[in-house]
Amino acid sequence: MNSSDGESGDRRTLWVLSLYQLFSNNRSSLFTVYFVLFLVVRERVSVAEGLVVLSTAYFSSSLIGPVAGRISDRLGRRRLLLLVAEASSLPFFALIPVVPGFLLVGVFFVVGECLLSLGSTALQAFIADVTPPEGRGAGYGLVGAVGAAGSILGVLVAGVVAEVFGLDAIFYMVGFIMAGTILLIVFAIPEVNLPPSPSRKPLKEMKSVAVFSLSTSVRTLGTGAVTAFFATYAYSLGADPFDVSLVAVAGLGATALLGARLGRAVDRVGEIRGYVYGTLVVVVSLFVYAVSSSWLDVIPARVIYSAGFALLSPAMLSWVTKVAPADRRAEYLGFFSLINSTLWSLGPLPGGAVEALWGPLGLFAFAAATSAASVVAVLTLYPTPKRTSPPT
């Protein structure tokens, strides 16, 4: 097979992986929007108790990242990990409506999320496997954009399903989506057999990834809190639940429309500049949040925030895959995800304390401060060369 055939096959694989991400985000958006509501309505628990289950599931699944990545690298078979993750987690999600009791429902959800996370790092590494280094940002941007479209579709369709058939039907809908995802993996995603990594890499040899992960993820201590808070903030400014969904869809729409283009921008300016520019755009969104006087003002804030994230996210992932050995990409990505997701999940704790003491303005100032600290740390650790004018 010549190089053009190989490139064509890789592009097709990237588009199929984007379609997989569409289904995956469709499912995850349903959990983000409706799982806590399901617990509150059916199990008669408080919102705080529902959020604890949701946070526990996401935090637990992030801890599995390095192990799942290592398994993917040792086997050298990304597609197999995707299939195992979807097939093993499906029963736990689909059975939630018939499981008795809040505790058991929580256990099923946490176990399902942990099993599903086995495929997360395999997917991110798969994208790197089929994209050249100079086009990796574009690859991650495309997958993120298509995934955002899936999130929009999931929220809109689930709203109709929940209204007509009740909240239980959301989980049956998830089971239907996952069955389709499994068929997609089996019949459309090719297996790329990579040479398995021969031995485990000591964690100390991933020091560069640890430093990069900490310097970029400190931002999430503030922005993670804003992500959890924006719906409540819009509600406090006069939004009803439907209006809140419009704010969320506006942000996802920005990612869907701009994600691929911003991913290509990362390839042009470089990962470090892409991360810095994206973070600065997020800071601008925090200012718009702070001066909002109506829930309608939150829409442009959310759009700007999503655009910034659509720039910084492929920059981070591309940087990690470029420093990782080809046979350890998934392990490196899992290690990065462990640090990033952990700090993100902890963000609502200090952010909530700041908001309780100084209100929304204090929260946005805190998020801006952590973002600025991240930019300073990244520019200090990874100085970018000055651009020179071409000779005349």
Image: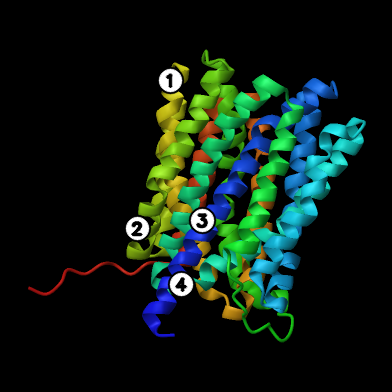
Q: Which comes before the other along the chain, label 3 or label 1? A: 3
Q: Is residue 299 above or below residue 266?
A: above
Closer mark to the observer between disc 4 and disc 1: 4
Closer mark to the observer between disc 3 and disc 2: 3
Structural crowding at the residue carrying mark 1, measured as other residues with C-alpha within 10 Å and reported as few (<14), some (14–19) or many (≥20): some
Q: Which residue is mark 1?
A: 296
Is there a contact, CB below 8 Å, between mark 4 and mark 3?
no
State the quadrant of the N terminus. Answer: bottom left
How far apart are labels 4 and 2 at the CA level? 24 Å
The foreground one among 374 and 137 is: 137
Q: Which residue is mark 2?
A: 265
**Amino acid identity at mark 2:** Ala
* Left or right: where 42 falls relative to 6: right
Q: Which residue is mark 4?
A: 9
* Left or right: where 355 falls relative to 13: right
Q: Which residue is mark 3?
A: 18
How far apart are labels 2 and 1 at the CA level? 29 Å
How far apart are labels 4 and 1 at the CA level? 44 Å
